[in-house]
Image (spheres, grey):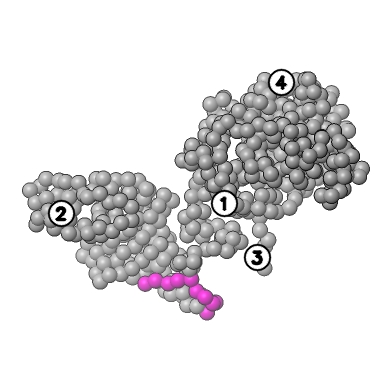
Amino acid sequence: MTDSQPHDSGELGVHQAARLEKLKKIEAQGLDPWGHRFDDRSFIEAVRARQGEVRYQLADGSQIPLPEFDGPEIIDYKAWKASKGPGGEEIGPAVRVAGRIMLMRTAGKLVFLNIRDLTGDIQIMIPKGHVSDEDFELTKLLDFGDLIGVDGRLGRTNTGELTVFASKLHFMTKTLEPPPEKHAGLQDPELRQRMRYLDLTYNTDSLQTFLKRTKIIHSIRSTLAKHDFVEVEGPTLHTIAGGAAAKPFLTHHNALDMQLFLRIALELHLKRLMVGGIERVYEIGRVYRNEGISPRHNPEFTMIELYWAYADYRVMMDLTQQIIIEALDAIGQGYKTHWGDLEIDFTPPFKRRTYTELFEEHTGLKIADHEGIASLARKLRLDPDGKHPDVVISEVFEEKVEDALIGPVFVTDYPASLCPLTKRSATQPEIAERFELFIHGMELANAYTELNDPILQENLFKTQLQGMAEDDSMARMDTDFIRALRHGMPPAGGLGIGIDRLVMLLTNSRSIRDVILFPLLRQES
């Protein structure tokens, strides 16, 4: 009745042939091996929540609750029933469930199955004589991985395990491939990512991670709804790759005979909407950057960008903290969590440190000491020659400071020359009103008090930082964006958060590929 993961192609063929033979027998019984509509089924989690409705009815007709069943402990439920005298019987609600067969065993005239759906697992008991002869014969054609539906009564076995005692079976889908090895599961990371359908089926932790991802995104939308934000969808094909410094993916539009870019950011179109009067606007969407792959980077990833009229970067700090705290609440996570062996304490308020403070603390150099910083850059095997001093400072900061930031910590007040889309401080024009949120050396969020001066914005586009490649996306000016700004964009705070990185940190996932359902992989040979 069972099979396991084969160890060679010959054994694989044997198991596939056996499943095909069972498929033919199912069809010969007049059953559809690919299933049918199955109304009024309950999720297994909801069925398990009804265990309090299972009662024991004594001979005199009175009902008493069952003994406490705590955790996986096995009790002698049979002896407990015997102690209540003859003539009693267990009663429980009628239920209907469906799921994938995860375990199978036969004990005489009893067949036991464990089935799993989106919400959990439950045991099914199929006693001969309690189902039709046809249904009992059908159990001989079942395999691990098959999908079935069950009508029955919820109750307890003699060992106290919550169980559906089947009265009717419904065949839903025959699987023609054997599942992964029963005990080893699907462990190879690349196979898990390539065959995500098996990863979700047989690795419950993986399924829970992606269900939490959904809850986190729903929570973000809920948080922003409290502040009257409007969600929009911007174009993914851009004529100019703007809004970030990144290498874009190129494509070609045949009908218009023009080169286009997959978007590298959401920013510039959202700001156009601010000009159009949508004062609190956001998008959660895919962006594409034709760059490296690492545990923290994937060429296709999800981010949120939002803009809040008449706010600034300090408002964005408060909002960022609220988004993260409410996301933790949504997934039932405490504020002290783990990321691998590292602890993260999200207890608010998050720390706030200036860029200059952190740079001088971790390098021992004053930020105005350009000569000393250039010397340190060379020791770090960074080439400072021909670069704007603030670019060198930025490279040293990335090398010496970022990995030391445990966080969560808001790094605030960046050198203005590094932030061409950011409003300058009114009292310190060399400082940009910007922050980045770091947690264990990883940048999670980036926010500005947005630059809305079209004249200054145009000049900044024209005079990009020294050392930037001529073909860099930020070196090209979006003239329509400048035209939009000339029609008046309100002062605003803007924020971007990497959704994948946020999910990584909140679900204890060490690789970004573990929180993206279908990360980009090399083609199979």
Q: Considering the numbered disc 2 on the image, is that residue within a helix, a strand or a loop?
A: strand
Q: Amino acid at mark 1?
A: Asp
- Of residues 334 and 241, the one nearer the viewer is 334
Give the quarter of the figure containing the N terminus.
bottom left
Nearer to us of marks 1 and 4 is 1
Q: Amino acid at mark 3?
A: Glu
Q: What residue is rendered at 47% in x and 55% in y?
A: 204
Nearer to us of marks 2 and 3 is 2
Label for residue 490?
A: 4
Q: Considering the numbered disc 1 on the image, is that residue within a helix, a strand or a loop?
A: loop
Q: Considering the numbered disc 4 on the image, is that residue within a helix, a strand or a loop?
A: loop
Rendered location of residue 498, percent (x, y): 64, 41
Q: What residue is rendered at 9% in x and 57% in y?
A: 86
Residue numbers of the magenta segment: 1-10
Q: CA distance from mark 2 to mark 1?
A: 51 Å
Mark closest to the chain's N terminus, 1 or 4 = 1
Mark closest to the chain's N terminus, 4 or 3 = 4
**Residue corresponding to mark 3:** 524
